[in-house]
C-alpha cells in the first residue's frame, strides 16, 4: 500500500485565490511527522510546512497552512493568496518513528497559478 | 554554509560507464539521505547515513549502486555499469539530529543523470 497518496496530478488556481492540495497517508505508527515540499522547475525540494501526529493545532507558516485530520489520515496543504511564483510541483511526505528514518513521498501535484 | 550542494548538476554518460556523484550536506547535519526521482514521480528513498554509518538501504539500491560517507561529512553515490533505467534525478538531503520525527530534510538541487 502507498504510504502517501496525492490524487490531484494537476491543479489550477487564479492568482490571489486560495487553493487546497490533497494528501492522505497510511501508517500504523502513533508517532509520525507530515511534511510538504515545493519543487520548482529548477529541481530543488523546498521545505514548506510540518505537522506532527501529536500536534493538536493545524500548522501554519505564512501563506501555507496544513489542514490535519488525523481520523481521516489526511494532511491537506492550503495556500492562501496564490502568487505566480507558487507554480511548481508540491509533494506531501511522511516520516515514521518506528519504521526508520526515511521520508516517504507522494507522486506530487503540479500547481499552476493563472494571472 | 548556504545549504546542501550536489555536484555535478548534470551528467550524460554512455551505457555501461561508471558515474560518481558528490553531496555536501549542511555542515552541522549528521543525517544524510540519497533519493532518486524519475519524471512524474516523487522521490524514492535509496539510502541513509547517520554520521559515517550507512544505516538503511532500499531494495531499489542494486549491487551496482554504492554510497559512502567517509568521516561523516560529504557523501558519494557511485553507479557502476550504468543502464538506461538509471536515468533520473538523484537528490541528496540532510537533516539534524534534533527531535525526530519532526526534523525536516533539506535537499540539494540534485544531479540529473542521462544514460545514452
Image: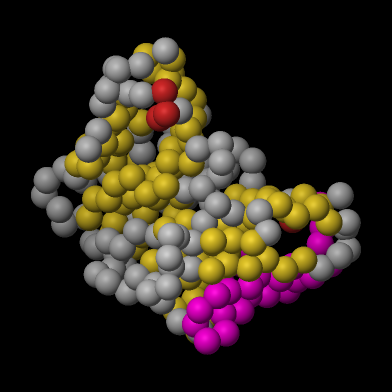
Task: Estimate the x, y position of residue B57 in percent, counting from the top left.
Answer: 56, 72
Instruction: Say if residue B112 shows up in the picture.
Output: yes
Tell me if B23 is positioned left or right of A56 in this view: right
Asked whether B72 falls inside the magenta stretch, the response is: yes
Q: Quadrant of residue A69?
A: top left
Task: Estimate the x, y position of residue A18 in percent, counting from the top left.
Answer: 28, 22
Q: Residue at x 83, y 56 (%)?
A: B13
Asked whether B38 falls inside the magenta stretch, the response is: no
Q: Relative to residue B23, is residue A92 depicted above or below?
A: above
Q: Residue at x 88, y 56 (%)?
A: B14
Q: Along the line of sight, which residue is nearer the eye, A100 or A51?
A: A51
Q: Quadrant of the C terminus of chain A?
A: top left
Q: Relative to residue B68, is residue B113 depicted above or below?
A: above
Q: Residue furthest front?
A: B1
Instruction: Say if residue A99 shows up in the picture.
Output: no
Q: How is the image coloured?
A: secondary structure
Q: Residue furthest left?
A: A56
Q: Relative to residue A65, is residue B68 depicted above or below?
A: below
Question: Which span is picked out in magenta?
Answer: B56-85
Tell me if A112 is positioned left or right of A80 in this view: right
Q: Quadrant of residue B99?
A: bottom left
Q: Residue at x 55, y 75 (%)?
A: B74
Q: Residue furthest bottom?
A: B71
Task: Estimate the x, y position of residue B23 in percent, counting from the top left.
Answer: 57, 67
> How many labels were placed on the picture?
0
Q: Relative to residue A104, is residue A70 depicted above or below?
A: above
Task: Estimate the x, y position of residue A95 in percent, counting from the top left.
Answer: 36, 59
Amino acid at each position: 500500500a502507498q504510504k502517501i497518496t496525492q490524487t490531484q496530478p494537476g491543479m489550477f488556481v487564479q492568482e490571489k485565490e486560495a487553493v487546497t492540495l490533497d494528501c492522505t497517508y497510511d501508517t500504523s505508527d502513533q508517532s509520525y511527522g507530515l511534511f510538504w515540499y515545493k519543487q520548482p522547475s529548477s529541481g530543488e525540494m523546498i521545505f514548506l510546512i510540518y505537522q506532527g501526529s501529536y500536534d493538536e493545532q493545524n500548522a501554519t507558516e505564512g501563506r501555507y497552512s496544513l489542514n490535519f485530520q488525523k481520523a481521516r489520515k489526511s494532511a491537506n496543504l492550503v495556500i492562501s493568496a496564490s502568487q505566480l511564483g507558487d507554480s511548481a510541483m508540491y509533494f506531501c511526505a511522511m516520516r515514521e518513528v518506528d519504521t526508520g528514518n526515511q521520508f516517504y513521498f507522494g507522486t506530487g501535484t503540479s500547481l499552476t497559478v493563472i494571472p | 554554509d548556504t545549504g546542501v550542494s550536489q555536484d555535478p548538476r548534470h551528467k550524460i554518460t554512455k551505457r555501461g560507464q561508471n558515474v560518481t556523484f558528490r553531496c555536501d550536506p549542511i555542515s552541522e547535519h549528521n543525517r544524510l539521505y540519497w533519493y532518486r526521482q524519475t519524471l512524474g514521480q516523487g522521490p524514492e528513498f535509496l539510502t541513509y547515513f547517520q554520521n559515517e554509518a550507512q544505516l538503511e538501504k532500499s531494495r531499489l539500491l542494486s549491487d551496482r549502486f554504492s554510497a559512502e560517507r567517509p568521516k561523516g561529512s560529504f557523501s558519494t553515490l557511485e553507479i557502476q555499469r550504468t543502464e538506461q533505467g538509471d536515468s533520473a534525478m538523484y537528490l541528496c538531503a540532510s537533516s539534524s539530529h534534533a527531535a525526530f520525527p519532526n526534523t525536516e530534510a533539506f535537499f540539494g538541487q540534485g544531479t540529473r543523470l542521462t544514460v545514452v
